[in-house]
Amino acid sequence: MAKAELHVPGWVYLALVVAAAYVPPWLLSWRSGSRPTEGPTFPATVSQDAREPPSISRDSNSLQDANTGEAAPSEKFGPFRPDFAAEVPETVEALLEEGEAVISRLRSRHPDDADAAAAIAEYNVTRGREREAAAKSLATLQTRAAKVYSGRGDVHRAEEYLRRALSIDPGNREARRALAILYEGVGNDVAAAAVLEDWRRTESDDVTPYVLLAALYGSRRDFLRTQEVLAAAVSRFPSDPVPRAMLAKLYIDTGQKSEEAVKLAESVVAREASAVNYELLCEAYLACGRLDDAERACHLSRAESPGNPRLRHLEARIREARAAAGNPKK
């Protein structure tokens, strides 16, 4: 049997893409047609019960991959039997005992897995004797274990370990991110959004859930919610250029609020005069028909990054716009 692979969610690449070129994942997925939708159809339950998002495990006998319609790869592992009781450890001794149980399961289930060995080694090094240290260390171990199970296609087990990690350490950012990625990877966008919405609500000083949530909504072409999340991030984090750049790009790509896109792009350049930011500003000026400004921004971007192939496309668009306006540059 061929090794099963999980669908790679487009928004996983958000942090890399936005740092490099502010090309939003929703734009890439929309143009490629990789995940067509019929418009914004998010259920109201996304924000109503975010602390208990729809799970994979509860319907483990009927889970299907949303992209292929086939049974999830984890079903090859047979009936799902949880590794943990419902109760969360309350003492240092119980926390350490659960950690040893996780290590034992990883060793027996994946004895030759390098990631499993690394997770075990990290836990053994970082494990503390104070309750707080023990609880962050155990949550990290379970998050690492979840990634091992997910990599082997056992999404039910991965979900269980991530939810367990969050029950022990609700503020664990790595577990939150991994759980959202896991849900989105099997097509359960409702659960992924619930995890990110809860993260945004409980960690109000962290811009990360805003950025990831906007990308998730954008990948569904739910641009109204994408705009709402990014606008909230711009207001909440006025000195962070990433939400501003993403919102400007959204306005440019959807053909709305062009003047606002210019203001946002200009503020991004004011904070960081980089090649990618000048490129964004060029696009914003083009959207408003400010061709001279667009050309200047394009030249500034090329001065910072001479080999950027996207600039040739922008320069061609500027020439076409001038020709269409009957005002070719002399």
Image (cartoon, rainbow, N blue to C red):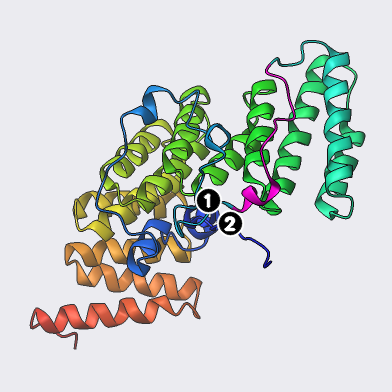
| Secondary structure that dominates the magenta span | loop
Residue drawn where x is 77% and y is 22% of the image: 135
In this figure, which residue is indicated by the disc labeled 2?
A: 6
At x 70%, y 33%, the residue is 81
Asked if the residue under mark 1 is in contact with the one under mark 2, i.e. CB atoms within 8 Å, the reply is yes
Q: Where is residue 266 drawn, in percent x and y? A: 33, 53
Please rate how many residues cluster around mark 2, counting C-alpha atoms within 10 Å: few if below 14, some from 14 to 19, many from 20: some
Horizontally, is 178 left or right of 138 in the view?
Answer: left
Mark nearer the N terminus (2 vs 1): 2
| Numbered label tally | 2
> Amino acid under label 2?
Leu
- Secondary element at image label 2: loop
Helix, strand or loop for disc 1: helix
Residue 102 sits inside the magenta stretch: no
Badge number at residue 165: none
Q: Nearer the viewer, residue 303 or 210?
A: 210
Quadrant of residue 327 within the rendered picture = bottom left
Task: Give the percent coordinates (x, y) of residue 256.
Answer: 19, 53
The residue to which callout 1 is attached is: 185
Q: Amino acid at mark 1?
A: Gly
Residue at left 17%, top 78%?
A: 321
Q: Is 82 contained in the magenta span?
A: yes
